[in-house]
Image (cartoon, rainbow, N blue to C red):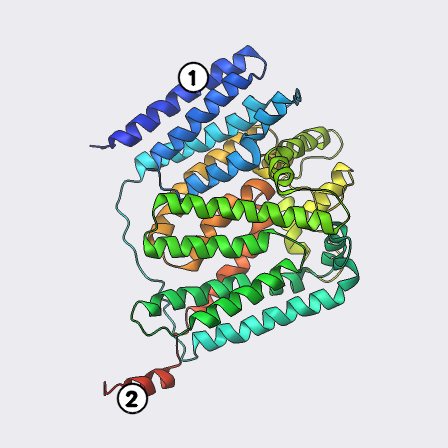
Amino acid sequence: MLRINRRKMIGLLLLSVSAIVYVFALASGQDSIFEYTLLLACLTFALLLNNDFELISPAVLFTAYFLYSIALGPIVLMNMGRFYSYGYTKIILGGLLAFAIGNGICLIVKKRPVHEREDKPKIRFSFSRIKTLYFLLVVSWSAALYYFIKNRSYLIGDIENGRVAAISGSGTLLYTAQVSILLVCMLFDIYIETRKDLRPLISKFTMIFVTVVSSATLIVSGFRAPVGTLFICMIVMYAGKKKMPMGRIVFYGLLCIIGVSVLGAIRTTMSGGVSSTLTSFFTSLYVGNININYMYNTFPGKVDFQYGYTYLINFLMLLPGPDLDFTLWLKEQVGITFSGGGLTPTIIGEFYINFGEAFIFIGLFILGVFSVYLNRYFKRHKESFLAVFYVWQFAHCVTGGIANVSVTVLLYTIVYKCLIMLPYRSTKSFNRRRLADGQY
């Protein structure tokens, strides 16, 4: 017999009520701030209840990012008197409802307990993982330095536009520079694990040094997301290992949002614009809604639906030549110009431009189902960087879509799987240490 705890029972009931309210809201034929806010609150609370208020879980992080980047925007826009033809309630809350239903149904079906386990590869090599990580960090930093020197004319002055010109033809170099995210996090993992035995293999000073230098090399590209990813992954890893209380997790999450907003304001100011942290924050609440409107105005009226082609664009960018990345390609298709990077379609816009409006709901339902399977992987490998990275990229695809995270996810998976084949220390070094400790 299927047993459902009281919290999930309330969550599923609230989800059912949300579906009924959604149907009535659609029947009214117009967006209402009151109905929209009420339905959004119901859906958010239902998702939290169904996922046991686990703040560090794929479904909850996805929902939080969805709220910040897409769902709260219409409240601001409706207060400003701005309404778009695609319908805030129909598309945005309909998509979130589809995600919640997929998540809720799969949670009922998948009831087997999950047991944590360490990432243990079938093949082991005797090279030192720590030394290899240091070596690869130097390679990554060198790539970042070369990227900066090569594109210094773009990255000094008007950073908003210069960073776009700099990335053209330098995709592989930039990905190499940004792999320091993975390397620093793997060193951080070793630092925390070996510190438990009061014999850390990496000193606190070294850990701080590599984090600071890597942060600087990530910022120098002109993009905020990589340095944000680094610190978010480190925070989530630390929270999982130290069983951090909910309040502190929320506090660090808010710090990350503020930090990203500050970097955005600084970048705009350095490029000759006028901005503030508060302006940057509020703009980020509704810019996704404006971008969705661009998608509807362009596809399929001016440009045909892409039927999956957008998922290949960033892979094609890695080939030699000045190919555009997905967001810059999209900006060109829409035919707009603005300072800064490309046009991020949001996960809703990406589903729409590929397969049409119906796939928005189908796609988000599938992501809701996938969030349960990803959470099971995350719980089994809670202390590994890769599990944390997967969860963050799952949430991060809310703004730029799946295409914007696919290359990084594939690259980091391959590098991580190779690196965990190496022990912390080489076999010879480990044996010498045991001999010195009198264990032979």
Label total for image: 2
Visible residue check, residue 403: no
Visible residue check, residue 344: yes
Kind of residue sitting beneath label 1: Ile
Q: Is residue 204 above or below residue 93?
A: below
Crowdedness of circle 2 by 10 Å Cα count: few (<14), some, many (20+)? few
Q: Give 387 or 241, whichever is nearer the viewer.
A: 241
**Residue displayed at 64% across by 55% down:** 315
Q: Judging from the image, what secondary structure is the residue with disc 1 in? A: helix
| Residue indicated by mark 2 | 436
Q: Judging from the image, what secondary structure is the residue with disc 2 in? A: helix
Kind of residue sitting beneath label 2: Ala
Residue 279, horizontal then vertical, whole percent: 64, 38
Residue 226, horizontal then vertical, whole percent: 58, 55
Q: Give 230 or 268, whichever is nearer the viewer.
A: 268
| Residue indicated by mark 1 | 20
